[in-house]
Image: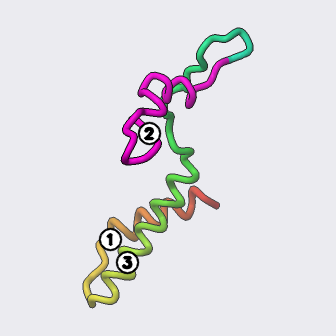
């Protein structure tokens, strides 16, 4: 990624390496700080998101006068029990 002063002067403000160095920063000894890899979403948040997705799907099916799959209702019940 390069940032430019303006369209008339296409001199890069930052090169990719400089941009990377700035975003990671350095520690007190001058060594580059490396971000850890992306981990997992906490289970309680994932369950809340899943519950919301199921509830929204149930509403869409209800609005369309369609039968709600039993698996969805069972999963919703399981999630509600886990989040109590």
Image point 51% across, 56% down: which residue?
Answer: 47
Q: Which type of secondary structure does the marked residue at label 1 adopt?
A: helix
Picture quadrant where residue 48 is located: bottom right
The residue tagged 3 is 58
Q: Position of residue 54 (x, y in %)?
A: 41, 68
Instruction: Measure the alpha-carbon separation of dots 1 and 2.
Output: 53 Å
Q: Which mark is residue 3?
A: 2
Q: Which type of secondary structure does the marked residue at label 2 adopt?
A: strand
Q: Position of residue 14 (x, y in %)?
A: 47, 30
Asked whether residue 5 is drawn in magenta, I would say yes
**CB-based contact (under 8 Å), mark 3 and mark 2:** no
The residue tagged 1 is 70
Which residue is more in the foreground, 7 or 74? 7
Which quadrant is the N terminus positioned in?
top left
Q: Is residue 62 left or right of residue 27?
A: left
Which quadrant is the C terminus positioned in?
bottom right
Q: Which residues are magenta?
A: 1-26
């Amino acid at each position: 990624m390069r940032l430019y002063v303006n369209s008339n002067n296409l001199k890069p403000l930052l090169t990719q390496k400089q941009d990377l160095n700035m975003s990671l920063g350095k520690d007190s000894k001058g060594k580059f700080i490396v971000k850890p890899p992306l981990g997992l979403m906490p289970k309680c948040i994932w369950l809340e998101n899943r519950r919301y997705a199921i509830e929204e799907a149930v509403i869409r099916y209800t609005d369309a006068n369609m039968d709600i799959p039993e698996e969805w209702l069972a999963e919703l019940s399981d999630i509600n029990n886990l989040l109590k």
